[in-house]
Amino acid sequence: MLQFAKWKTALIIGICLIGVLFTAPNLIGRQTLDALPDWLPKQRLSLGLDLRGGSHLLLEVEMGAVLRERLASVADDVRSKLREDGTGYAAIGVDGDAIVVRARDAADAGKIADAMRGLNAGLDVSTDGGLIRATFTEAEIAHRRDQTLAQSIEVVRRRVDELGTRESSIQRQGDDRIIVQLPGVENPGEIKALLGTTAKMSFRLLDPTVSAAEVLSGGRLPPGSELLDGTGPGGQPTKYVVQRRVLVSGERLTDSQPSFQNNEPVVSFRFDSVGARRFGEATQQNVGRNLAIVLDDKVISAPVIREPILGGSGVISGTFTVQEANNLAVLLRAGALPAPLTVIEERTVGPDLGADAIARGEFASVLAFVLVIAFMALYYRRLGLYADIALLANLVLLLGALSALQATLTLPGIAGIVLTMGMAVDANVLIYERIREERAAGRSVIAAVEAGFKGAMTTIIDSNLTTLIAAALLFQFGSGPVKGFAVTLSIGILTTLFSAVFVTRLLVANWLHRARPKTLAL
């Protein structure tokens, strides 16, 4: 029967009311919204870069640095393995994109090659007499590239979110690039500085056997040490001779926060259990020596270890401003980038362009809504008015769903809304035309309406399902604005099916039940 059960009626009305609740925050002021009870929905539509204005950055991941670092690490493993096995070698090192080992005895070349294959299955090892060369296979390089890009995207996302930037869009482009879109950020200088910092931190000791001045004047740099730039007392640039051996790496940090000590900005940090143990042992064994805190091969602080630090936490002091201390804390919390990032493209979208896009989009949406309502009301009379009410419900449900899901609304998204409104009445047109055919065949009003809704259902589902499949493919394989259009269109199709079939049917059924009309104006 056409008449709805009471529980179905209550369910349809309830869904529409939920849509109203989630749409309402977009229509009222922020102060009024904050004053409402916390249990009410308060999510608003997130505006994209093209509507709100902001910054667009295209970053390139330096994959070459990752592969070189990995080759150096494997070369160290090979060196340790050969020493452990007692296999002699004349030299070992990295030459371009290969690890090169020169055996003392050519007869040991095969043994060395087997040892290298056993250490890393991703190596392609070849021998030429006593010379052994190993390069990464294409599969290993592709794996490293995907892993590095995924890690870089995650670190970039954490850094951006730590700054309080919401609704950012961070996605992969090609094999070595990342697109970062930051709505509302008109001056991306600070973001670029954060994203351009690798933030690889380590805690090491200064070399007490030689000073930086002696090395700069021609003195010999001790083996196992290196000369690094740094900041000295008063913020003056200086040099430090730092041991290469890492006591504790920054990977062991679990938290870092900006704070104040002696009225100066500092950064407090805390290690995990393993890092706390290593840090405690290192400070216990080196009381009186300088501990170098190295960030991206630059010494940011080199305090004297006055007593063992056994609690797993400490403070990084220096000539920081409040902003610098906050940024350093953000970098340490987010973790180190696996590879340096280079900004190769930067665009800024002003808020005026976004306001103009919103105004034009609003005008197009309102005009489309008015024209569709006028056409349906004039052509289908009373049933057209019911279709118009269902269209209004569809728009409310669509905006409510976008707000609840915190989907970012872009200019193509507005186009999707306009398209949805144009498509929304298609289902009603199919139903009403089927009803008109049934009436022409001599059926009663109720029988014709019943047959119209049932007969058109298959066609409605088929037409909307094919559009939904196309929208899903756009979302899967598209990027940026295309995805925004696909999201809006997909949600619009679902709300259209609900409003055109259930809301319209509920309104028509209630009217037929109350009025019992003998004729139907179509």
Image (tube, rainbow, N blue to C red):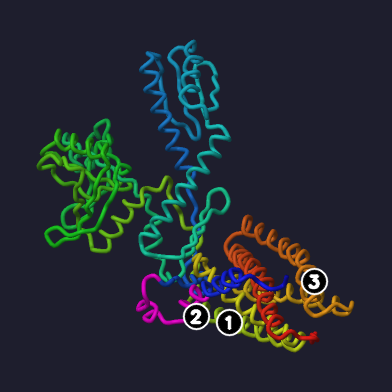
On residue 320, the disc is: none
- Residue at left offset 14%, top offset 58%: 261
Using a 10 Å C-alpha cutoff, classify the residue at mark 2 as few (fewer than 14 neighbours), some (14 to 19) or many (20 or more): few
Q: Is residue 411 visible?
A: no
Q: Amino acid at mark 1?
A: Glu
The quarter of the displayed image where residue 257 is located: bottom left
Query: Which label lies toward us, 3 or 2?
Result: 3
- The residue pinned by badge 3 equals 451
Q: Position of residue 287 (x, y in %)?
A: 11, 37
Q: Position of residue 349 (x, y in %)?
A: 50, 72
* Disc 3 element: helix
124 lies above or below 402: above
Query: Which label lies toward us, 1 or 2?
Result: 1
Q: Is the stretch drawn in magenta largely helix, strand or loop?
A: helix
Horizontal placement of 430 versus 252: left or right? right
- The residue pinned by badge 2 equals 352
For the record, the magenta segment spans: 20-39
317 lies above or below 103: below
Q: Position of residue 425 (x, y in %)?
A: 71, 76
Mark 1 to mark 2 CA distance (whole Å): 15 Å
Give the mark nearest the N terminus, 3 or 1: 1
**Quadrant showing the N terminus:** bottom right
* Disc 2 element: helix
Using a 10 Å C-alpha cutoff, classify the residue at mark 1 as few (fewer than 14 neighbours), some (14 to 19) or many (20 or more): some
Considering depth in this image, is 238 or 67 the residue closer to the camera? 67
* Callouts 3 and 1 close, C-beta under 8 Å: no
The quarter of the displayed image where residue 490 is located: bottom right
